[in-house]
Every structure is written in C-alpha cells, then in structure tokens.
Image (spheres, rainbow, N blue to C red):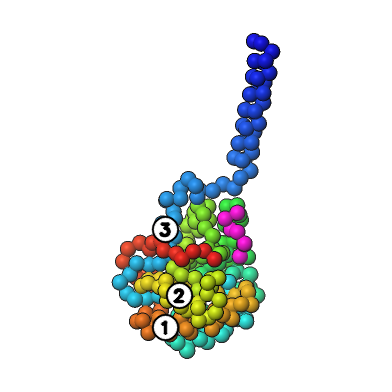
Amino acid sequence: MSINRQKNYAWFRMGFEIVLVALLGVALFSKPTERHINKASWHNQVVYFVPTDQKVAALTFDDGPDPRFTPTILNELDKLGVKATFFMIGKQMEEYPDIVQDVIKRGHAIGNHTYTHPHDIEADTRTQVITELEECEKVIEKMTGSRTYLFRPPRGLVDGTVFTVAEDEGYRTILWTVCADHHDAPTPQAMAIRVLHHMRPGGIILAHDGTFSSRWKDVEATPLIINELKEQGYRFVTVPELLDMAKEPPTQLADGRR
C-alpha cells in the first residue's frame, strides 16, 4: 500500500471511530423515549374531547389550589350551579389543605397535575415522571380518601415516556379542546369569546386558578364562559362524567399548547 493510501485509510478509520463514539454517546446519555418510535400507539389515546351527542362541556382548572383565586372561582361555580374538575399540584395541596377540602365538599373532581409542576416534564427521566405522579397521588389519597385516575401533564407536555408512565400508573391523560388563556385573548371577555369559538359538544375547557397573578382574568372569565355556553344550550359536567358519556373512544382535537 502506498504512503498516500495509508494516510487516507488512517484518516478514514479515525473519522469512522469518531462518528461511532458520538453515536454511542447519544445512545448512552440521551433520555429514553418512545415518542419517535411508538407515537402512533399512544397519541390518539390522549383525551382532548369526548365524542358525544349531548351538548355538554367540562370546565377544568390547573395549577391550584391558590388562596388568591380558587375560593372566588368556587363561589362563582356555586352561584351558577356548575361542577368543575381541578387538576392540582401536590405541593400546593399540602400548603392549602383547607381549600382542597372545600373543593371536595362542593362536589368538584380532582386530578393529578404532578407534585412540583416541572417546567418540561418531557425532559425528565422515567423515574422522575413516576415520582411526580406518585408523590402527588399520595397527597390526593391522604386528603380525599381515594385516588384519581385523571392526569394532566404540566403545560400539556406529553411524549411517549410521559404517556406510558401515566398509563402504567393507572391514569387517563387529559388535555383540552380549548385553552381560555392565550396570547390572542388578553382580557376576560376575549377569553370567553375564544372558548366559544373553539367549543363543541364533549369539549374540555382549560382555565387556571393558580401560579401567576394574571389568573384574576380566569376568575372574571369563568362566569362569562359559563353563561354564554348555557345560552347556547350547553350544560357542564366533570371530566369523569364526561368520559362516561363517550359514544366512541375520546379523540384528538386541540387548539395548541400554551
């Protein structure tokens, strides 16, 4: 073999080894995930709305309980005779147990919204996701006397790992048909209009009762949304009640993540 051919071969071998090492590093250190491999097997099982012939809607609130907003929302719901579903953060529940008890006494449903509300649960390991769900569930069981089978991932982020963990833990993953909070809805009135625009029978509405000070808009939007939808002939049910009304498996329809 000539000297030039030997040099070329050496460079080729070195390049091949560098690529091989890089690929092995990705395989060893990247987060295990099913979302690129088995997406078709799980994404249609995430609940965005429930197909039904009945003109019903499920109003849901995320990120509470919060003393600034949850009690006022509860009072508004009572005035209008509406039951809602509250997806609660475990740490918030521990901090405000009296509000949790008030939600239960008034007949509303509670769902698991993780223990700490991680910013990007898709970036968490499987073990971390399990811990978030199980720690929140411990709080729910302690405060309510029973477990929930409803799970909503923070910020609506769900991949194959998150979905599979939730399913293994016995949960239905619940997202939404329309989110009232959105950059194109800066006022309570605009939030209500946005919900009306995207609503359909069996739809799930996302609002918030915690975290940011701007949630006062959700408080004011709540009666607007309820009254307008009632005028259109809708009645309100909890998410468990809505799931029981399905005439076929719940399917995908979302207005975009927040």
The magenta region covers 117-123
Query: Which residue shows up at 34% across the image and 76% down it?
Result: 55
Asked whether disc 2 touches disc 1, contact meaning CB atoms under 8 Å apart, the reply is yes
Nearer the N terminus, badge 1 or badge 3? 3
Under mark 3, the amino acid is Gln
The residue carrying pointer 3 sits among few (fewer than 14), some (14 to 19) or many (20 or more) residues within 10 Å by Cα, namely some
Residue 135, given in percent of the width and then of the height, sits at: 60, 63
Residue 47, given in percent of the width and then of the height, sits at: 43, 63
Residue at the disc numbered 3: 45
Nearer the N terminus, badge 2 or badge 1? 2
Q: CA distance from mark 1 to mark 3?
A: 30 Å
Under mark 1, the amino acid is Glu
Residue at the disc numbered 1: 228
Between 33 and 98, the residue placed more toward the observer is: 33
The residue carrying pointer 2 sits among few (fewer than 14), some (14 to 19) or many (20 or more) residues within 10 Å by Cα, namely many
Q: Above or below — where is 178 with respect to 7?
A: below
Query: Which residue shows up at 41% across the image and 61% down it?
Result: 252
Please, what secondary structure does the residue beneath circle 2 have?
A: helix
Q: CA distance from mark 2 to mark 1?
A: 10 Å
- Residue farthest to the top? 1
Q: Above or below — where is 249 with respect to 76?
A: above
Q: Is residue 119 left or right of residue 194?
A: right
Q: Is residue 115 left or right of residue 225?
A: right
Query: Which residue shows up at 36% across the image and 81% down it?
Result: 232
